[in-house]
Image: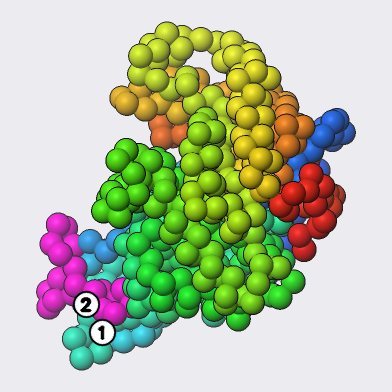
Amino acid sequence: MRFPELPRILRSPRRPASPGRVALLAFGLAACVVAREPALAEPAPAWVGARPARVGMNLAPVVDYGTNLPFVDVFKSSRKWSAQGDPVRLGPTGDPLPRPGQSVQTLMVREIDGHYPPGEYVVSYDGTGEVAMNRFDVIDVGEEKPGRLSAFVAPGNGGLLLEVRSSEPADPVRNIHVWMPGFDGGEATFHPRFLERLRPFPVLRFMEWQRTNASPIVEWADRPRPEDARYSTEKGVPLEVMIELANVLGADPWFTIPHGASDAYVTKFAETVRRRLRPSRKVYVEYTNEPWNSMFKQAGYLKERGIAASLSDDPFLAQLRYYSQRSVEVMKIFERVFGGTARLVRVAGSQAATPWVSEKILEWNDASEHFDALGIAPYFGGSYGKPETASEISEWPTAKLLDALEKEIDGENREQIGRQAEVARRFGVGLVAYEGGQHLVGYGGAENDMLLTDLFVNANRSPRMYDLYARHLRHWAAQGGGLFVAFNDVGAPSKWGSWGAREYLDQPAGEAPKERALIEAGRDLRRPAAVPKGSADAPELE
């Protein structure tokens, strides 16, 4: 169910506050916190045929315009501080240090069509200064005193604007929190509905939370920390918070190590995971993300390192070999810290469309001996976003596009998975999907074709998308695929893609065909997450 709306009388900014109004807001809050998802209008059909071993989920990034709403403190997802174009100086944890006379602002839950909880939001902070939150979706201001204020919110598209209008240099405003209704005090980290939506998925890939693509992290001192003001910076979410989420859900975390990370960083990272993660959980380890993909900064880094090390006269092969070599070094550090490989699933990332890339990564200096799984992203639908064909395809009816996707899933996509499964068998490793699902998005200028975007969004919302995902996942399993980690959990559609299994955290299950298919595929399965070396049937990796 959706987050409950405020009663109509409360949505008018012209009406003054009253005790009755506060009571009604509290009622809306209670409904928001304790409500449960209603049953589907029609039960999901029984699954037929082979299923993937397990279905995991990539987590969408933490950003101010995100519809995933992971934290009860929405300030953790806030936008970078601004001051009308002037630079904003920050303290060691990211709190603003405005100069005298300078006012700084940040935004939260911005432009998400009101898909966040209504009610009384509480702002708390330390230090001396003037703090305000009274614009956009705020319809009334409640308590205001040093260190604390509250605002009544009727969610819309404007979001929340928080201002630090003044801050004493000797005692600056800091440790700012903006608590969702009912969570003042911070006893919980994650919103209950966010947890509820992730419970069906036993593996969580944190690539986006870590901001792995173009990560600036090299040394342990560079890492994000739990006490940081925001988790929406280029450094990403702190490792401790990711481990906490895995522990709360009883899920296996999948971490992607930054491309420039030093050995000392990798060692500290592994030690922290071993110390904090529940001993019953596996740890998926992958060095960087998509080492072959030239659109990401890490690909250039790998190429430069490979060429400098004279790993090949061919720049791309040098890039792949350096990735393979550095991956093995990372895996060896984890093996040493964990005292072996029993709790580890070591993943080599590759390009789904090109088995040759997989071969070169796995064969270099017998790298496959330090991997448990070959990871690919068997997306379907990626070819329909080309600028050369955008004007033609944008005129298609939705049914025609869905028919074309079905043909691709049954043909080229299935064959692609089979070829990669053969490579994995040859090198004695399992085959997993680090990402996967539909890939309907324009690029190279086609993203600006609104007719094409509308077609892609409609296809993602179609009930037939459930059938396409089910078909795709059956083929994945039948061709030899193991763990399938979908991309991603929650995200609103736009010209940049319709990646979310749900569009909004409060979207009813009956309106989320992709999520329904993923949950149904993985429900009640007790098969392995990856196939061990030399075996077609692996024991449970629990």
Q: Position of residue 536 (x, y in %)?
A: 79, 44
Q: Does residue 76 belong to the magenta stretch?
A: no
Q: Position of residue 262 (x, y in %)?
A: 37, 70
Do residues under tags 2 and 1 come within 8 Å of each other at their CB atoms?
yes
| Residue displayed at 37% across by 27% down | 443
Observer able to see residue 198? no
Q: Amino acid at mark 2?
A: Leu
User: Badge 1: few (under 14), some or many (20 or more) residues near its Cα, within 10 Å?
Assistant: some
| Residue displayed at 31% across by 73% down | 94
Along the viewing direction, whichever of 137 and 339 lies nearer the viewer: 339
Could you give the CA–CA distance between mark 2 and mark 1, rounded to whole angstroms? 7 Å
Q: Position of residue 275 (x, y in %)?
A: 60, 81
Along the viewing direction, whichever of 146 and 78 lies nearer the viewer: 78
Name the quadrant of the C terminus. bottom right
- Quarter-wise, where is residue 514 in the image? top right
Residue 351 disc label: none
Q: Amino acid at mark 1?
A: Pro
Q: Which residue is mark 1?
A: 172
Q: Which SS class for mark 2?
A: loop
From the image, give the main secondary structure of the stretch colored magenta. loop
User: Badge 2: few (under 14), some or many (20 or more) residues near its Cα, within 10 Å?
Assistant: many
Numbered range of the magenta stretch:
83-102
Q: Which SS class for mark 1?
A: loop
Q: Is residue 67 left or right of residue 182?
A: left
Above-or-below relation of 144 to 501: below
The mark nearer the N terminus, 2 or 1, is 2
| Residue displayed at 25% across by 89% down | 171
| Residue displayed at 18% across by 86% down | 169
Q: Which residue is mark 2?
A: 97
